[in-house]
Image (spheres, grey):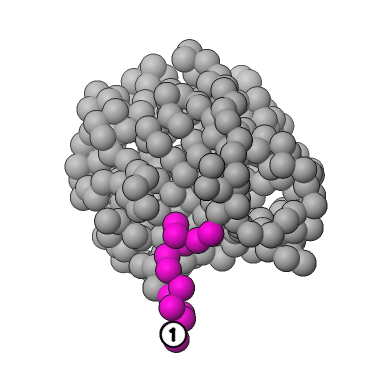
Amino acid sequence: MIDRRRVLTLSLMAMAGCGAVFAAARLFQPAQGQRRGPPWAAPVTSSESFRVGGATIQVDFGDGTVDLPRPQVMRWVENAASSVATYYGRFPVARDRILIQPREDERGVQGTTWGGVGGFPAFSRMRLGEQTTADDLNDDWTMTHELVHTAFPSQEDDQHWIEEGLAVYVEPIARVQNGLLPAEKIWSDMVRDMPKGNPGSSDGGLDETHSWGRTYWGGAQFCLLADVTIREQTHNRKGLQDALRAIVAAGGTIDQEWPIGKAFAAGDAGTGTHVLEDMYDRMSRKPVTVDLDGIWKKLGVVRSGNGVRFDDHAPEAAIRIAITKTPKSGRILPVTGETHAAGE
């Protein structure tokens, strides 16, 4: 059983785009003195299911209520699953379980994902504040972020940065490819946030420095640089998306424990390059400052006021366009299933 967990707490301020996200990865352990079981054994009052990208997604609802109607909550889950399936060409695991736990007198979302627990390849517990609004869910990235975690094998703590970095990088791109976000929005966010991953004066490589910035945004920098480099080496025929699809096709999902080298070798085989393995050799043990300004310039991402504008005459504008373009496999939409009460 793989019970490593990934936690993202999204405060109300963060949902408005101006707050902080706090994260941790640790083995599940009840608080001292508590006898409660693991999250996947929590009570369920009702369930719904749908299919997307060859997978069955079971959505369970725990005790409590939220202000939003049930169909709106389900649409939030379906959009996230559809975005992940669209990016990967299928949903990464054949069966996924999502538990929605209402939180009284709260607003916001907190997500945690495990692999290989409770009889499912993947399980996500989503704590949903009772007062969460429709706009909050429309703007939310947490659900998609958590489902991206299903698409990479579980790593040791030193390599946790690739799990979180991939989720940070892939989540917004998947939502653009699924028609849920404009490309300008995510490139603007990357220009603003990617520098948070730069190494500090006392930092080591990605395997050695486990700060929030290096884990989440240092990992995201690795993914951005890998995506651009793969596309440069393949004349824009392949990208990180192809590498990640190859890892999933080889069986590299959250319910498996693979060394990072095995995952990167599978990804490189999918692009016919050695980009992931070479970059890992270069960045895992030594601090590397990625030339973000140089990347934005050649991709044609130009700061403009509080956002960005695109320069389609930039040398690698075609790479920028390809990264967020809906793949040839097309959008993969959900097919709704059944609703039933617990015990039925």
Q: Is residue 107 magenta?
A: no
Quadrant of the image containing the N terminus: bottom left
Of the pair 221 and 251, the residue shown nearer to us: 251
Looking at the rendering, the stretch of residues picked out in magenta corresponds to: 30-43
Which is more toward the observer, 234 or 171? 171
Q: Position of residue 117 (x, y in %)?
A: 35, 53
Would residue 206 be seen by someone viewing this image from the given angle?
Answer: no
Q: Is residue 9 visible?
A: yes
Left or right of 194 on screen, residue 14: right
Camera-side residue of 279 and 290: 279
Q: For the point 41% across and 60% down, which residue is it?
A: 5
Q: Residue at x 52, y 55 (%)?
A: 125
Asked if residue 54 lies left or right of residue 252, the reply is right
Give x and y (percent) for residue 8: 55, 59
- The residue beneath circle 1 is 32
Q: What residue type is disc 1 on?
A: Gln
89 or 190: nearer the viewer = 89
Residue sitting at 46 percent across and 81 percent down? 34
In this rendering, the answer to whether 178 lies above or below 69 is: above
Which quarter of the rendered picture does the C terminus lie within?
A: top right
Relative image position of residue 245 (x, y in whole percent): 36, 28
Q: Secondary structure at mark 1?
A: loop
Q: Residue 304, image x and y in percent?
A: 75, 39
Task: Left or right? Give the position of 173 relative to 97.
Answer: right
Q: Quadrant of residue 266?
A: top left
Q: Is residue 19 above or below residue 296?
A: below
Q: Residue at x 59, y 26 (%)?
A: 336
